[in-house]
Image (cartoon, rainbow, N blue to C red):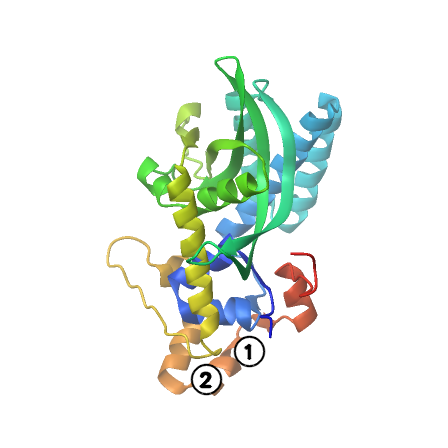
Amino acid sequence: MKSTPIVVSYSEIDAMRQCGHKHDLAFRLGWTSRTTAPALSKGKLYHDVMEIHYKAIMVGAPESERLRAIAETLLDAEERNAEEAQLVAWMYDGHLEKWGTDDQWEILAVEDQSLMRLPDRNGRASRFYLRMRIDLLVSESVGGRPKIYVVDHKTGQNLPHEKELDLDDQFGLYTWGLRKKQVPVFGAIYSAARTQRNVGEMDIDDRFRRYKVWRTDQELETIAREAWETSRTAYARPVWQAPRSPDSHPIGPSRCKAKCPFTEPCLVGRKSGRFQELTFLRSGGFEELDEETRLAQRGYIDPLMPK
């Protein structure tokens, strides 16, 4: 009997590694918060603006057309959250000041989506498919030779440290997946933009930075195999049997406080049981997505699709 294919995204793999209970609630049971966290909302709007920006460049649209489309997007966003729209407008102005229209790049793809089967420990194709959604794929001439890079737009209060990027498997998984599809990706570019807007004047180099990340073939294979191992372990357990992974870091932001929308219902469930946790979810600003919506969001594929 063949196993049913399962599609996982990097976001889901990251959730599996943070906390099994969070993964169950968000991805296997389909619970979601009715309100988007401010950081996620800013990041999504900035990504929307970047998508318009680079698609316009890719097709050679006039600058006036590109700016008009972005202005319309920001005006729509302003009706929902004026402060957020103004922040992203400031970020986009800074992006233009720092990077312009990236004339050194040939834009190959914008918001490209595809699937790639993860390998098991023996290197064979597993039932887990990695869903890749790549912000930008570019070709850059280095020393007269074109090199292809995966570019990912990241926003945050502060710019990251390079060691953080070495530990970020998203770039490695996307590089691995594209190479398996015969796209000769040389490396990844982490394009970071700060969301923190200080009262005083800010130097443009303190607001935007790009980091180039390279991985060896062995590292990429290890990252892909470990993503399969994470997925296999998470789905081997029945729903509701994954352990919680409490994190209450006394200094830095903990996973429970900073990266999980389910902290309150989780604590209720730990104290009082599953029924009370579900009751809290239903009455506490969460909604349960129906199966069809969950499958669509996770990129469900037919078990009989060509392998």
Query: Which is nearer the eye, 111 or 160?
Result: 111
User: In the rendered image, which quarter contains the N terminus?
Assistant: bottom right
Dot 2: few (<14), some (14–19), or many (≥20) neighbours within 10 Å? Answer: some
In the rendered view, tell whether residue 3 sits above or below residue 164. below
Find numbered disc 2 in the image and state the secondary structure of the residue it sits on: helix
- Label disc, if present, on residue 274 of the rendered structure: 2
Find numbered disc 1 in the image and state the secondary structure of the residue it sits on: helix
Query: Which is nearer the eye, 15 or 276?
Result: 15
- Label disc, if present, on residue 299 of the rendered structure: none
In the rendered view, tell whether residue 51 sits above or below residue 79. above
- Tell me which label, 2 or 1, sits earlier in the chain: 2
- Label disc, if present, on residue 283 of the rendered structure: 1
Give the x, y percent position of residue 7.
Answer: 58, 60
Q: Which numbered disc, 2 or 1, marks the residue closer to the eye?
A: 2
**Point 50% across, 40% down: residue:** 175
Give the x, y percent position of residue 130.
Answer: 55, 54
Give the x, y percent position of residue 66.
Answer: 71, 28
- Residue type at mark 1 is Ser
User: In the rendered image, which quarter contains the C terminus?
Assistant: bottom right
- Is residue 129 in view from this perspective? yes
Left or right of 106? Residue 259 is left
Left or right of 253? Residue 63 is right
Give the x, y percent position of residue 279.
Answer: 52, 83
Query: Which is nearer the eye, 137 or 251?
Result: 137
- Residue type at mark 2 is Arg
